[in-house]
Image (cartoon, rainbow, N blue to C red):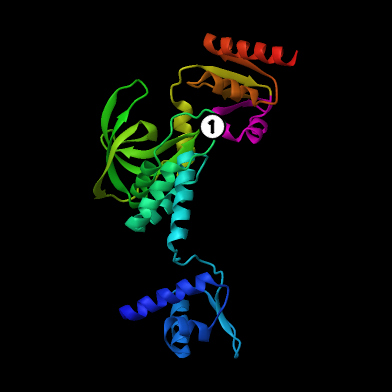
């Protein structure tokens, strides 16, 4: 296919995306070719997987229809900026964005022209939103995008990591998946030095650098990255201990509190154990307040003191 033909077909595809239906004569005029050439180019687009419908006759025309697979799309400058800002904003807000959105952002930013990157950065730095709650540590959207590319390409990365006790060490890992939990983003990766799977909080990662070395994708133990990460998080040490014995079946509690995941353990058909331990006292109170049934609590003195203070404040408010 010659370069002129390629350019013409890209122009044809762009035109088909801007209007519901085009006549063959209109397309021929826009492309400065014959109607016969338009028909041949339409057939070439169909062979490439683009579902183009046509109507016969003098008033017939062409339109881009929906298909079973998503073919490559052509975006104008405004559309590319709008999609990139939307994806970046969602990533920056960390409101449960799926990993697929991050992969889309990585693909789009990889081909975004330099002039449009400037517009996107300007919009991102000057636009503000109202937050109605205090948020914890936030991950850098640029870091999310970079790690999404590394996960997609199975490219080893190096970085400095600060542990919960404040010590910083140099790490080298094979990125696998990005996981969101409790308002925080984690990188699930295989630590090459320790030869073991690790979860790294993105807000504790600095100086992340791709090495250029790609390796075969490594399967996650159990085959479910989210479940594996949930199990690791539930077993991680916390500052405050709070264990509730709930007088209800585990399935009942889990159905009404989707975020509890592996923190629930059934004891029998009518009782389960909830590990509400956390580093943040108000979050423990929030988890327990979400239970819609009675429970007994085994917790650290700091937890019990915080719950008593919260209960007294609530009783004064409703008295």
Q: Where is residue 30 drawn, in percent x and y?
A: 46, 81
Q: Is residue 143 left or right of residue 131?
A: left
Q: Magenta stretch containing residue 263, yes or no?
A: yes
Q: Nearer the viewer, residue 103 or 296?
A: 103
Residue drawn at point x = 64 percent, y = 26 percent: 290
Q: State whether residue 17 appears in this view.
A: yes
Q: Quadrant of the N terminus?
A: bottom left
Residue drawn at point x = 49 percent, y = 65 percent: 70
Residue drawn at point x = 46 percent, y = 30 percent: 233
- Say which element carries label 1: helix
Q: Where is residue 194 drawn, in percent x and y?
A: 28, 33
Q: State whether residue 1 appears in this view.
A: no
Q: Where is residue 202 drawn, in percent x and y?
A: 38, 35
In this figure, which residue is indicated by the disc labeled 1? 262
Residue drawn at point x = 60 percent, y = 19 percent: 244
Residue 65 lies, with reference to residue 60, above or below; the image says above
Q: Is residue 56 left or right of residue 14?
A: right
Q: Magenta stretch containing residue 163, yes or no?
A: no
Q: Where is residue 275 drawn, in percent x and y?
A: 55, 23
Q: Which residues are magenta?
A: 248-271
Residue 139 lies, with reference to residue 89, above or below; the image says above
Q: How many marks?
A: 1
Q: Residues within 10 Å of mark 1 (few under 14, many from 20)?
A: some
Q: Nearer the viewer, residue 210 or 21?
A: 21
Q: Is residue 70 left or right of residue 294?
A: left
């Amino acid at each position: 296919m010659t370069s002129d033909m390629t350019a013409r077909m890209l122009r044809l595809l762009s035109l088909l995306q801007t209007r519901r239906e085009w006549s063959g004569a209109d397309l021929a005029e826009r492309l400065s070719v014959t109607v016969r050439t338009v028909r041949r180019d339409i057939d070439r687009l169909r062979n490439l997987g683009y579902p183009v419908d046509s109507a016969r006759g003098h008033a017939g025309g062409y339109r881009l229809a929906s298909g079973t697979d998503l073919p490559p799309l052509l975006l104008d400058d405004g559309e590319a900026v709008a999609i990139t800002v939307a994806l970046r904003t969602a990533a920056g807000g960390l409101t449960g964005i799926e990993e697929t959105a991050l992969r889309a952002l990585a693909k789009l930013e990889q081909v975004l022209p330099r002039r449009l990157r400037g517009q996107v950065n300007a919009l991102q730095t000057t636009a503000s939103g109202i937050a109605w709650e205090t948020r914890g540590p936030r991950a850098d959207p640029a870091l999310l995008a970079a790690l999404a590319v590394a996960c997609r390409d199975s490219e080893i990365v190096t970085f400095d990591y600060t542990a919960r006790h404040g010590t910083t060490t140099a790490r080298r890992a094979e990125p696998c998946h990005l996981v969101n939990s409790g308002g925080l983003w984690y990188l699930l990766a295989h630590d090459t030095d320790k030869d073991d799977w690790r979860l790294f909080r993105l807000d504790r990662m600095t100086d992340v650098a791709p090495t250029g070395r790609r390796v075969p994708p490594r399967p996650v133990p159990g085959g479910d990255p989210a479940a594996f990460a949930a199990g690791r998080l539930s077993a991680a040490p916390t500052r405050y201990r709070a264990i509730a014995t709930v007088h209800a079946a585990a399935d009942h509690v889990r159905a009404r509190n989707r975020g509890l995941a592996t923190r629930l353990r059934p004891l029998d058909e009518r009782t389960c154990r909830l590990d509400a331990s956390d580093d943040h006292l108000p979050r423990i109170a929030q988890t327990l307040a979400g239970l819609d049934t009675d429970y007994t609590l085994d917790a650290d003195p700091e937890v019990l003191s915080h719950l008593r203070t919260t209960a007294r404040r609530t009783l004064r408010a409703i008295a």
